[in-house]
Image: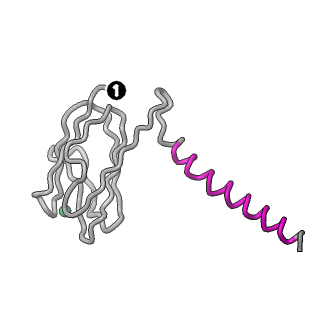
């Protein structure tokens, strides 16, 4: 009986190690090697709204939009700098902003959904 308990303990230890390893690996991937800053930003689309209407980020930042609505949305640059396909529920689209400037965008299915990304010089 004691032996079974120690086997269970080992299995638990392995499971804990495995689950702890993946989030830290994901965080490491998000780090900018030059500054150590965590660069990635996520914008949730919910209730027909881009939840960060005016986002300011340093150049080099990767932005991911994820649709939490039950209807599809798109993420389309007004100045044709980026364009997603129609994103179904929980689908996402990413774009890395490398040049400083102002990037207005909208949903082409619901053109009243508008927002901006402002990109500043790299830190
Ligand atoms: Cu939309």
Question: Residue at horizontal 30%, vertical 35%?
Answer: 57
Check disc 1: other Cα within 10 Å, few if <14, some if 14-19, many if 20+: few
- The answer to whether 98 appears left or right of 53 in the picture is right
- The answer to whether 67 appears left or right of 30 in the picture is left
Is residue 74 part of the magenta span, yes or no?
no
- Split into quadrants, the picture shows ligand 1 in the one at bottom left
Magenta span: predominant SS is: helix
The percent coordinates of residue 14 (x first, y second) are 73, 59
Relative height, residue 114 to residue 40 (above, below): below
Relative height, residue 24 to residue 72 (above, below): above
Q: Is mark 1 within 8 Å of ligand 1?
A: no
Is residue 25 part of the magenta span, yes or no?
yes
Residue labelled with disc 1: 122
The percent coordinates of residue 122 (x first, y second) are 34, 26
Residue sitting nearer the eye, 117 or 49: 49
Q: Residue furthest left?
A: 112
The percent coordinates of residue 20 (x first, y second) are 62, 52
**Residue 89's image quarter?**
bottom left
Question: Residue at horizontal 26%, vertical 64%?
Answer: 86
Q: Which residues are magenta?
A: 4-27
């Amino acid at each position: 009986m004691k032996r079974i308990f120690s086997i269970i303990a080992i299995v638990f230890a392995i499971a804990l190690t495995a689950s702890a390893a993946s989030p830290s690996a994901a965080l490491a991937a998000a780090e900018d090697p030059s500054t150590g800053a965590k660069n990635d930003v996520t914008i949730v689309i919910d209730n027909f709204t881009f939840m960060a209407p005016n986002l300011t980020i340093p150049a080099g930042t990767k932005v991911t939009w994820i649709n939490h609505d039950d209807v599809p949305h798109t993420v389309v640059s007004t100045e044709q700098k980026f364009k997603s396909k129609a994103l179904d529920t929980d689908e996402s689209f990413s774009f890395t902003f490398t040049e400083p400037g102002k990037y207005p965008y909208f949903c082409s299915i619901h053109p009243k959904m508008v927002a901006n990304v402002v990109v500043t010089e790299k830190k």
